[in-house]
Image: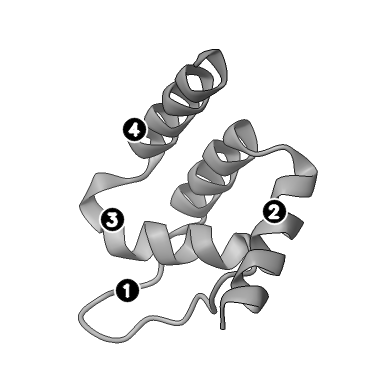
């Protein structure tokens, strides 16, 4: 239960840190940092500015430990 609570708190912080004005672009950029997708966007979405990219990267780093990103890539490959 404590593990679930800790994860919920970290995910809430991640959600709060994502720029809300460009949520789809933020999510796509975050997923690309994890190796789960390419950061390409189609109109009307526009690429995040460097400040927003940095914010997303820091928020993800605060939630994940280094080996979780590689586990996420392995999960994606196994689920295809």
- Quadrant occupied by the C terminus: bottom right
Query: Measured along the vertical axis of the image, is residue 61 above or below residue 70?
Result: above
| Structural distance between the alpha carbons of marks 3 and 1 | 11 Å
Q: CA distance from mark 1 to mark 4?
A: 20 Å
Residue at image point 22% right, 51% down: 21
| Residue 60 quadrant | top right
- In this view, the mark in front (3 or 1): 3
Instruction: Give the residue number, with chain letter if any, for mark 2.
Output: 69
Q: Which residue is mark 4?
A: 16
Horizontal side of residue 42 vs 57, given as left or right:
left
Name above or below for residue 2 compared with residue 54: above
Marks 1,2: beta carbons within 8 A = no
Mark in the foreground, 1 or 4:
4
Report which quarter residue 66 is drawn in.
top right
Label 1: which residue? Answer: 46
In the rendered structure, the answer to whether residue 66 lies left or right of residue 41 reads right
Q: Is residue 36 left or right of residue 19?
A: right
Total marks in image: 4
Residue, disc 3 = 23
Marked residue nearer the N-terminal end (1 or 2): 1
SS state under label 3: helix
Whole-number angstrom distance, CA of label 4 to CA of label 2: 20 Å
Name the residue at 57% across, 70% down.
36
Dot 3 or dot 4: first in sequence order is 4
Question: Helix, strand or loop at disc 4?
Answer: helix
């Amino acid at each position: 239960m404590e593990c679930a609570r800790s994860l919920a708190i970290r995910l809430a912080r991640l959600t709060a840190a994502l720029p809300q004005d460009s949520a789809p672009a933020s999510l796509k950029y975050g997923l690309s940092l994890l190796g789960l997708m390419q950061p390409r966007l189609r109109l009307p979405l526009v690429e995040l500015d460097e400040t927003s990219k940095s914010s997303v990267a820091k928020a993800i780093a605060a939630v994940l430990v280094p080996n979780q990103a590689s586990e996420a890539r392995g999960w994606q490959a196994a689920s295809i």
